[in-house]
Image: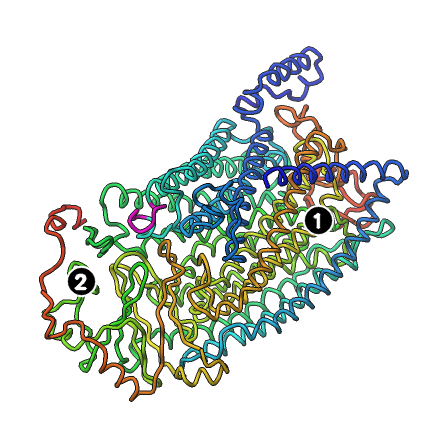
Amino acid sequence: MEVNQHSPVGTHHDDHSHHGHDHHHDHEESNNFFAKYIFTTDHKMISKQFLITAIIMAFLAMGMSLIFRLQLAWPDTKFPFLEDIIGRWGKDGKLDPGFYLALVTLHGTIMVFFVLTGGLSGTFSNLLIPFQVGARDMASGFLNALSFWFFFVSTVVMCASIFIESGPASAGWTVYPPLSALPQAIPGSGLGMTLWLISMALFIASSLLGGINYVTTVLNLRTKGMTMTRLPLTIWAFFITAILGVLSFPVLLAAALLLIFDRSFGTSFFLSDIFIDGAPLDYSGGSPVLFQHLFWFLGHPEVYIVLLPALGLASEVISVNARKPIFGYKAMIASMLVIAFLSFIVWGHHMFVTGMNPFLGSVFVFTTLLVAIPSAVKVFNYLTTLWRGNIQFTPQMMFAMGLVSTFITGGLTGIILGDSTLDINVHDTYFVVAHFHIVMGSSAIFGMFAGVYHWFPRMYGRMMNKKLGYIHFWFTIIGVYGVFFPMHFLGLGGVPRRYYANTAYEPFSVFMDINVLISIAAIIGGLAQLIFAFNFFYSIWRGKKSVQNPWKSNTIEWTAPIEHLHGNWPGETPVVHRWPYDYGKPGSPDDFIPQTVPYSETPESNTPEDLKH
Amino acid sequence: MNLLLTLAIVFGVLVLVRIANVAQMAAELSGENEDDEQDKSNKWNGMGFLLFMIFGLALMTYSTIKWLPLTLPVAASEHGVKVDELMDLNWAVLIIVFFITQFLLFWFAYKYRYNRNKRSFYFHDNNKLEAIWTIVPTIVLAGLIVTGLVEWNKITDLATKEDGIKIQVYSKQFDFTTRYAGKDNKLGASFFRNITDANPLGVDSEDVAAKDDKIAKELVMPVGQEIELVINSRDVIHSVYLPHFRVQMNAVPGMTTRFHFKPTVTTAKMKEITGDDKFEYIMLCNKICGVAHYNMKMGVRVLEKDEYTKWLRGEKKVFEPAAATPATPAAPADSVKSPVASI
């Protein structure tokens, strides 16, 4: 690859003239703003591009959620500033019911796809796969850059849809037809939905380009000694995630394409027997349930596309900060593989009451509840890793612990939703909203924060402020539980989700106080994210300079120079001699032994098992 | 307002800059090295986790006691009682697991916070332990799966059920209409192309079974009788959600879905049970269906059988003989010719 040609390798590095040449080359590059920051093919820069785009999108989506939380908690109050922000959608300080649905839809779409898929995988797979497997860059730097650019354009298209006359897509992030197919049914299903579909198609292209690259890099570009069972769990998680994405995203693309055909070319894949706006439509023979099958065939693996990278990041962060090897390394890999496999055969649990054959429902109950087993194994392995550890509470460790807590809480309520009998009455209520925001939303975002705090020095050569990190964590976890724990009760009270106001049924007014509480918690949690944003951007320029290996970590990304250079390592890529989790090994003078240290140098700590290697 | 907001933001940023700077400077001035600094953070945050657990679990318990009475009252249907029992069984298991695991997580965080004179315990594999926490959850889950599926099959297996009183719930943006099958307990066929203002359900006037069908704007059911809801939609997907009966089924255009259940508590009885003489059952749309989704609902009443019969007698027929609704299909002539209709 191009990258390899320019990389100073081995003896070349020692040769003064070549070194000078490299320096000149770097100099040339950094002079050109566009080449360095925009059209870069360097994985480190691309990961920053993903991260910063995702942070901006996350604030946008969070802002949307705060607007609709205002409406839900204070339905009778006018908020004049709404008109300043969203114009005619907030006329006289009242949120428009149609725009409420648009906000709900965009909040979900942006968070799930742009923040927790593009942002999370895009950032950390890009940063860590080459660094932790000991590669000079991704297998294809060009495809990688293309992946970011498809992603960026898709976010631009999605944002553009907010500004059009008929409003953005408003049929919920799952865009079930016929609602999403018929502009007569809801204004957002006009141009807004078209832009949604275009944006999603671009996003899928981005995701596939990224995924193929990640898989190829992990399989082919590992440095000497880096066997698959010496890979950090982060890499395993990204690797499995990428495979999931490559297999499932094309199905969403198929669904989107068929929906485009139905919308624009008069086909009837998902539509049949419709009478709307005083006239029957000519669609015949299609099935709305088919769309749901296609959507959730991606949609469920998508949950793990979001979650697995977070779990991978947490595994690494917990082990480093507990100064203890991750417990059950192989069981962790096995459980991720099992989860990944099962994730393809559980999609029907989103459809128990949609008119799908109930017998099929039984099968999905069975497969769904099986997912709880590998998940339980992961939780117990995390707990055992903490047991008798020596825990450093860095901000990343706090967020990783928060992840374990929310993963447990949300995972348990998943058992109720996965049971078709119990799902009948809580399906599409706030119980579901509570469940997936805790298990998927919060866990994944906690994992992402853990990753940012941990690898920030690796990205920017500076440290983030820890004190602000602690404040950020405590407000965030209090916010998360404050928002989503009370929602379970709304769900058990039968309050449907996606309701602009709970005025349809008078007894729901008993939940008013809870709704106020939720919104206050949301505002507090939201404000806490400003602390993070400040800390992040402040530290990029003004943070304390990082040392070589700030967290005393074993993995090989910390052996590369702090200053980024093309090809990551100035000389040969490091050679790996052991697994990444030798923390607190008895006999060793330090409480960590980096992967690059051969067993021959550590006779005092070698175990009989090690000698077999 | 905007000025105020801008000022607040500027002020907030300034405060954060101060915190960041002061924290760094304080550490440098006090001559504390980074390890001392980290020791302090470990102490405080370790305590934080312990307190968070204690207060968190206490608050959760308190709010559960406080809010549980706000949730749905006892199930008003035969299968609903079973669903609730099953739910309680699940909660019992889940709450135990929740408390144990959260306790361990936060307790370990506090107990094993960093001590620079200590080493962690190098312990990375134990097949026996891992086997235990693979097998135990498997057994527990098997129990939950089986009990759940047995009930699910009973609820959904229409073959084993006695014939129910057929009531069609017909959905459109943004209301429901009900149609009662009448004496023959057969609903006349309906087709979307028959829809007119006078015949909003598109019932086929030629169908003999439709002759005695009655139409209403509320769902009224006799107590203790098997009911078969026949669910249709004419535009987008809606969902028929009867929370008090633990009943939910989507209304899908182009197909018919069904839900069989037996109401067991009359509205009058439920008023007694809840101690609320204004209590009424409700049917809500629970699938996003458009701008007024949140207002799509229908009143529901459960009556004694004779009251029900009396009520039904008073309702109007789909085709009143006197009214002599024209039976011609309402579809505009040009809508039939499009070739894509058959794709």
Residue A334 visible: yes
Q: Is residue A397 left or right of residue A95?
A: right
Residue A104, relative to residue A49: is it above or below?
Answer: below
Tag 1 residue = A397
Question: What's under tag 1, amino acid-wise?
Answer: Met
Residue A120 versus residue B231 in the image, above or below:
above
- What scheme was used to colour the molecule? rainbow
B145 or B266: which is nearer to us? B266
Assign the C terminus of chain A to one quadrant of the image.
top right
Magenta part, dominant SS: loop
**Residue at image coords 27%, 71%:** B178
Q: For numbered disc 2, what is the local secondary structure?
A: loop
Q: Is residue A266 left or right of residue A335?
A: left
- Give the secondary structure at mark 1: helix
Q: Label 2 lies in what chain?
A: B
From the top left corner, tell me how far across and down residue A8 is, in percent: 64, 20
**Label 2 near label 1: C-beta < 8 Å?**
no
Residue at which label 2 appears: B191
Amino acid tagged 2: Phe
Q: Residues within 10 Å of mark 2 (few under 14, many from 20)?
A: some
Residue B226 placement: quadrant: bottom left
Q: Residue at x 74, y 58 (%)?
A: B49
Which numbered tag is attached to residue A465?
none
Q: Is residue A534 above or below residue A2?
A: below
Q: Is B88 inside the magenta-drawn segment?
A: no
Magenta-span inclusion, residue A184: yes
Residues drawn in magenta = A181-189
Q: Quadrant of residue B99?
A: bottom right
Left or right of A151 on screen, residue A316: right
Please name which of the two marks, 1 or 2, marks the residue nearer to the observer.
2
Residue B254 place in picture, x, y as percent: 24, 59
